Amino acid sequence: MEPLTHNGLVYEVTGSGPTVVVLHGGTGLDHQYLRPMIESWAAFARVVLFDHRGNGRSAAPDDWTSVTLETMVDDIDSIRAAAGVERMFLFGHSYGGFLALRYALSHPDRLGGLILASTAAHVKRPPNIPEDAPAAAVEAFASLFQGPMASDEQWARSWSAAFPLYAPELGEEAAARVTGRTIYRADAWNRGAALLGGYDVSDSLTSIEAPTLVLAGARDFLTGMEAHEELRDGIPNAELVVFDGGGHFPFLSDPAGFRSAVENWLARQPQHSAAP
């Protein structure tokens, strides 16, 4: 995939079929951890993936206070236009799911459907940290919310150390492959974390008209089953698929099952509205 740039946002396009724009989590990360999933989707979809503003390879703003949830949603629509489609399917993982839900509420006429993985309508629920979780991972996770990360290196160390909480089903070698190829941007994490207090779409879920697929890992400590069931029950045309062994990254623990769930759901949706 050759990287392209639009309005300072670095994006890539691969595959053919209905257009699916992919939103990575974080913030402060990039889309590299999603790449194996994306490459498998190219067999049945035209996948557009990009790094959020100031994340990964995308340009950082001169003033981070200018970045809001609304401006990040505007960036999604800018990428949609750059991809040359009037309507699209939108996949959001974790923080990317927050943005996907905001987009669904502000741009309903531009969506063919939503795919939400490991995400929630709000962040008011505390994490459910297992009693047997590694102490070092628990300590590293707590450090993520104890003040701004001072450098990209500190952010990379803290995230990598906390990762066993997010994906307890992965071994050390597999986890290292995920964390080791990520581009870390501390300023993006700091701004994204600061915006979390203003995120809550729980009262608006019934207004979402798009067909929605909710994908959950049964072992997800951060956005647990209650959060995913709230999405399923609140969005009128939503269905939930649970991956029994999965944590916050179920597409890594069960790539074949995750792909199958998305491919089968996508095949049942009207295709003309999202095709390029």
Image (cartoon, helix red, strand yellow):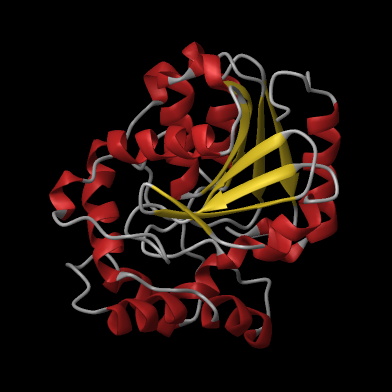
Q: Is residue 46 above or below residue 33?
A: above
Q: For the N terminus, which image quadrant?
A: bottom right
Q: How far across and how far down the image is residue 215, in percent?
A: 67, 42
Q: Is residue 25 above or below residue 214?
A: below
Question: Quadrant location of residue 69?
Answer: top left
Query: Furthest-bottom residue in view?
Result: 173
Residue at 43% x, 65% y: name it: 29
For this view, does 158 lie left or right of residue 110? left
Q: For the C terminus, which image quadrant?
A: top right
Q: How far across and how far down the image is residue 174, in percent?
A: 67, 81
Q: How many marks?
A: 0
Residue at 53% x, 83% y: name it: 180
Can you see residue 188?
A: yes
Q: How far across and how far down the image is residue 14, in percent?
A: 71, 52
Q: Is residue 238 above or below residue 100?
A: above
Can you see residue 120?
A: no
Question: Quadrant location of residue 103?
Answer: top left
Residue at 66% x, 39% y: name it: 20
For this view, does 181 lie left or right of residue 99? right
Looking at the picture, tell me which residue is in the foreground, 138 or 59.
Answer: 59
For this view, does 232 lie left or right of residue 58? right
